[in-house]
Amino acid sequence: MAAFNVRPDIDAAAAKLSSTLGSKREIQRLPEVLWEGETVEMLATGQYGGGAGLIAMTNLRLIFYKNGIMQQKVEDFPYGKISSVQWQGGIIMGTLTVYTSGNRADIKNMPKEQGKVLADELRRHIAQGTTPGAPPRVRRELPHQRLGKTSRAGWQRSISYGDRDSSRMRSTPSGARRSWTACRSARRRLGASWASRGVVCGRGAS
């Protein structure tokens, strides 16, 4: 068996394959389709959607990966969305059927031993209630949320001076706009004394 030196978990799974014929490229490039923190538990070969490729069972999902010269295909099945699996083995090869939300996917021409073990492991994941994984997401604030925070931060300094208009501040975008307008009005009224206090309005240093 050829040594790939891709990643420890992938190398260990690849070493258990009876043959890597037609899947060497996929094994070498498998990290490109994995999520952060996702680890490979088992590999197999098979045919799905008219093309032969690599089947990877990870701690989060089942992946079919085909990296051809002209086309790349990635189909994944998060464990939380799999309702059941079925294995039908022949003399040498077999078919793994995955059922998800009223749909079914048939992965054919899988080596008999690999397919049976993989089907059993899939059932274990389903029975344990493994939740579907997702790529890490960066939480982004909406513009009105940033405005509200900025307005509140600006008014924290002006409240200590007893400005009557500070009581009008609200956490809503419209309230933030009213507070900013009141702040600018107070600044115009107080003139130099306002500037000497070093107080700024919520929507910036103007």
Image (spheres, rainbow, N blue to C red):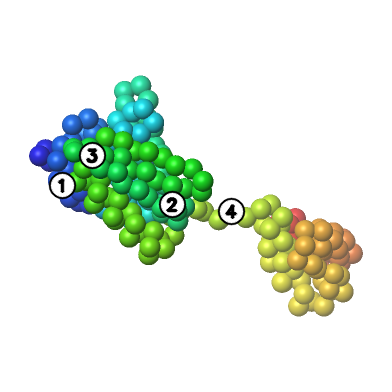
Instruction: Say whether disc 2 or disc 3 marks the residue closer to the N-terminus.
Output: 2
**Residue 173 spot, x, y in % from top left:** 77, 58
Q: Confirm whether residue 43 shows in the render.
A: no
Distance of mark 4 from mark 1, alpha carbons? 43 Å
The numbered disc on residue 140 is 4
Looking at marks 3 and 4 on the same chain, the residue that comes earlier in the sequence is marked by 3
Secondary structure under the numbered disc 1 in the rendered image: loop
Alpha-carbon distance for marks 1 and 3?
A: 21 Å
* Mark in front: 2 vs 3: 3
Query: Alpha-carbon neighbours of circle 3 within 10 Å: few (<14), some, or many (≥20)?
Result: few
Marks 4 and 1: which is nearer the front? 1
Element type at mark 2: loop
Mark 1 and mark 3 residues within 8 Å of each other at the beta carbon: no
Residue type indicated by callout 2 = Ile
Amino acid bearing label 3: Gly
Q: CA distance from mark 2 to mark 3?
A: 24 Å
Q: CA distance from mark 4 to mark 2?
A: 30 Å
**Mark sitting earlier along the chain (1/3):** 1
Q: Type of residue at label 1?
A: Lys
Numbered circle sitting on residue 90: 3
Residue position for label 2: 82
Give the residue at mark 1. Answer: 16
**Which badge, 4 or 2, comes first in the chain's sequence?**
2
Furthest-right residue in this view: 189
The residue depicted at 79 percent of the width and 67 percent of the height is 170
- Are dots 4 and 1 in contact, CB under 8 Å? no
Front-most of residues 205 and 88:
88
- In the image, taking residue 99 as reference, residue 16 lies left or right, namely left
